[in-house]
Structure formats: structure tokens, C-alpha cells
Amino acid sequence: MKHTLLLAVALAMASGAVWAAHESPFACNRLALTEQARKRHFDELGPALRDSKKTIREVPNGYEFGFPGDPATVQMVAEWVVGERLCCPFFDIELSFECEGGGVRLRLTGRDGVKTFIKSDFARWFAK
């Protein structure tokens, strides 16, 4: 199945087919998550990460959040990213891990308007 899809994409690209870019709206689609996943994402993981963040760094098209590098926090960040990709598909999401057991960095970026969306939707993350 995967090979068929890859072949179809390669053939379409070789034939000069143009793919239409779809840009989702700047709105969190909570219904992209099951009820149980919504509760976990918004009521448990989000507040826990907000409370454990160590740094926020503004980048040209978004923000980078720094967290401790302990296994439990890394696992929470990774789980949160899985849910966030579903409900906010307009984000470019990057995770980076510092060497020697250092921290983990979560970078949320995207097209024009994403930075403003983050500042508004994540307002509680920016509170001191």
C-alpha cells in the first residue's frame, strides 16, 4: 500500500501535476480528538507543561518553549505534540533535545498569523 502511494506521488510529480495547497484556518479543532484525548490534552498535559516550562523564546515565525529533559517531561511533551498536530494542523512543530540529558525544546511556528495565534491561544503559557 505504501509503495503504491509513493509510486502515485512520484508519477504525479513527474507528469507535472500541481498539488493544491490547503491551509487550515487558525482555529483549534477540538473535535479532531476523542473525548478522552481532549481531556488528556487540554486538562492534563497542557496545564502540566505550562507549569513545567522553563523558558519561552520568540522566533521570527513563532515561539520556542523550553522544558526540563527528564523522561517524564519528555514523554508529556511528545504526547502533547501528537494531539496538537491533530487539533492545530497549521503548526509546524519541532522538538529538539539538548545533549548530555539537557532540556527539550518545543518550537511552534508556521505561516503568517501563526505567531499571533500562539500569543493569543497560549496566553496562559506566557503569564509569569
Image (cartoon, grey):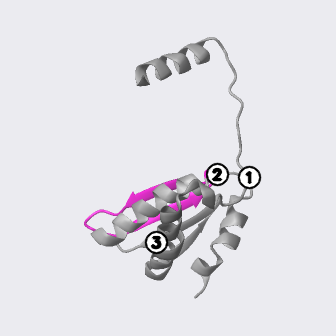
Q: Quadrant of residue 30?
A: bottom right
Q: Secondary structure at mark 3?
A: helix
Does the segment drawn in magenta span residue 101? yes
In the image, farthest residue toward the bottom: 128
In the image, farthest residue toward the left: 100
Question: Which badge, 2 or 1, comes first in the chain's sequence?
Answer: 1
Q: Secondary structure at mark 1?
A: loop
Mark number displayed over residue 90: 2
Does the segment drawn in magenta span residue 115? no
Residue 93 drawn above or below residue 5: below
Residues 42 and 49: in front is 42
CA gap, disc 3 and disc 1: 24 Å
Name the residue that disc number 3 marks: 45
Write the residue at 31% across / 71% down: 72
Write the residue at 25% across / 66% down: 100
Question: Which badge, 3 or 2, comes first in the chain's sequence?
Answer: 3
Q: Amino acid at mark 2?
A: Phe
Q: Secondary structure at mark 2?
A: loop
CA gap, disc 2 and disc 1: 7 Å
Q: Amino acid at mark 1?
A: Pro
Name the residue that disc number 1 marks: 25
